[in-house]
């Protein structure tokens, strides 16, 4: 019996023959995959408060952890890096536990404006017994309403202002937010889950950490790593609180293979990150323009996007159906997108493809009901991973 290996092979073959435009995903280089499937995947290492490792056989795995921390610090220019968190969500839990007490208030960008669902209602706030309120936000222009935010802060006295979005196309005025935060004594946390690779490449919100207390996020969306999370800070006390809130609080073992793979990805980012991130952002802007030229309505014309995401407009519904329908039509032709109207350029850019006019044309033809399966497959076959050794 080998049902699962068969299914995995089928999945690999399927996704290797499709074009991935999912904004939350990316591809791993061969070296990152090697680290991820190494012996480390079934090992433990845990240095206790006493300074002694509770496990044996860790002479290399201890070094792997500290090297990966060092590489991440170097990449983001931070004093401290917590790399153990196994997802952006867990990194956010750790950061909130380290900055907030029960019954305190947090501000975050609302779900209706593209904010992260986890920061509202029955999710993180109910788990940690905190309250969350929305940051006033102008969805049309994708901008925080800074003056209104000042007022809201005076009223609800937040202990944390949580920045970042899942639908994320425009950076913030960080200096202004820091000033507002200082006035009401709030910590600023920047959830850069979607854009960690673009921040590392200095192409999106390069001042994210400069004006915040914690920069956290996923390591696999625009970043080159395996699925995981990271939290960076320059504050020694926050750093030690975050370490304390990681192991034995929000999680136990931190997956040594993932840490090693993250370290390899950080090396790739240090070498190629700037070039990659700049091409990703260029491609998004061009894709927005090209889609409109092909009769597909895109939000935020004429600038479209400063990140790796382009957002389809609901105005397409009459002609092509809702976001779910659009995504299904594309998937029939081997073009993979999420069901929420986001189109991402990170993975195709990593695969060395920059002809956004062509992508727009394949999308248009799919939506018009034409069969472009073969063209998509041929295009995918011609791609080769870039920005790695
Ligand atoms: C994706 C995302 C997360 C969750 O990240 P995981 O790595 O999947 O745990 C958290 N916050 C934002 C803004 C996200 O987009």
Image (cartoon, grey):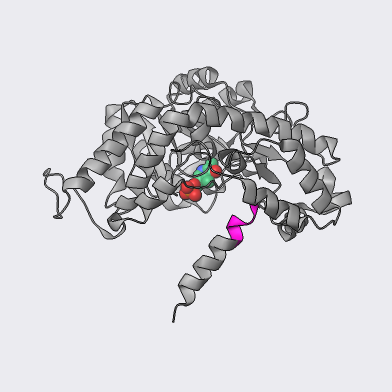
Q: Which of the pair 329/188 is nearer the observer?
A: 329
Looking at the image, residue 251 lies above or below residue 11: above
Percent position of residue 28, x then y: 47, 47
Tell me which corner region of the image, top left, top right, bottom left or bottom right, holds residue 140. top right
Q: Quarter of the image containing the N terminus? A: bottom left
Whether residue 17 is in magenta: the answer is yes
Looking at the image, residue 97 lies above or below residue 12: above
Whether residue 143 is in magenta: the answer is no
Please state if 111 lies on the left or on the right of 68 as rendered: right
Percent position of residue 133, x then y: 56, 39
**Range covered by the magenta-colored residues:** 14-21
Percent position of residue 175, x then y: 51, 17
As drawn, the residue found furthest toward the right would be 319
- Is residue 119 at all visible to an observer of this figure? no
Please state if 116 lies on the left or on the right of 72 as rendered: right
Q: Quarter of the image containing the C terminus? A: top left
Query: What residue is drawn where x is 88% and y is 50%?
Result: 319
- Is residue 292 at all visible to an observer of this figure? yes
Please state if 305 lies on the left or on the right of 329 as rendered: left
């Amino acid at each position: 019996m080998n049902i699962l290996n068969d299914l995995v092979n089928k999945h690999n073959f399927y996704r290797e023959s499709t074009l991935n435009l999912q904004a939350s995903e990316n591809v791993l280089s061969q070296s990152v995959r090697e680290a991820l499937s190494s012996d480390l995947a079934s090992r433990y290492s845990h240095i206790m408060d006493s300074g002694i490792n509770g496990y044996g056989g860790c002479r290399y795995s201890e070094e792997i952890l500290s090297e990966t921390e060092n590489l991440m610090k170097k990449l983001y220019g931070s004093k401290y890096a917590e790399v153990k968190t196994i997802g952006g969500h867990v990194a956010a839990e750790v950061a909130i536990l380290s900055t907030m007490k029960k019954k305190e208030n947090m501000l975050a960008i609302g779900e209706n404006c593209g904010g992260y669902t986890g920061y509202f209602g029955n999710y993180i706030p109910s788990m940690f017994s905190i309250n969350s309120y929305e940051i006033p936000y102008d969805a049309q222009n994708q901008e925080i309403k800074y003056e209104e935010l000042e007022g809201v802060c005076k009223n609800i006295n937040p202990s944390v202002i949580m920045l970042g979005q899942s639908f994320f196309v425009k950076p913030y005025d960080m200096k202004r937010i820091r000033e507002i935060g200082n006035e009401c004594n709030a910590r600023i946390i920047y959830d850069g889950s979607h854009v960690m690779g673009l921040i590392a490449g200095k192409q999106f919100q390069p001042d994210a950490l400069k004006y915040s207390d914690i920069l956290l996020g996923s390591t696999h969306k625009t970043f080159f790593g395996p699925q995981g999370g990271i939290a960076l800070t320059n504050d020694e006390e926050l750093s030690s609180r975050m370490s304390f809130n990681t192991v034995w609080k929000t999680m136990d073992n931190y997956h040594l293979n993932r840490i090693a793979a993250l370290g390899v990805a950080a090396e790739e980012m240090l070498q190629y990150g700037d070039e990659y991130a700049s091409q990703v952002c260029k491609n998004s802007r061009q894709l927005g323009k090209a889609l409109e030229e092909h009769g597909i309505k895109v939000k935020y014309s004429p600038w479209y996007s400063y990140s790796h995401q382009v957002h389809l407009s609901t105005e397409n519904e009459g002609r092509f159906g809702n976001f779910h329908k659009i995504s299904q039509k594309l998937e029939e032709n081997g073009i993979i997108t999420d069901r929420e109207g986001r189109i991402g350029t990170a993975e195709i850019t990593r695969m060395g493809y920059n002809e956004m006019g062509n992508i727009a044309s394949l999308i248009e033809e799919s939506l018009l009901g034409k069969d472009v399966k073969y063209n998509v497959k041929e295009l995918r076959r011609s791609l080769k991973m870039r920005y790695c050794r």
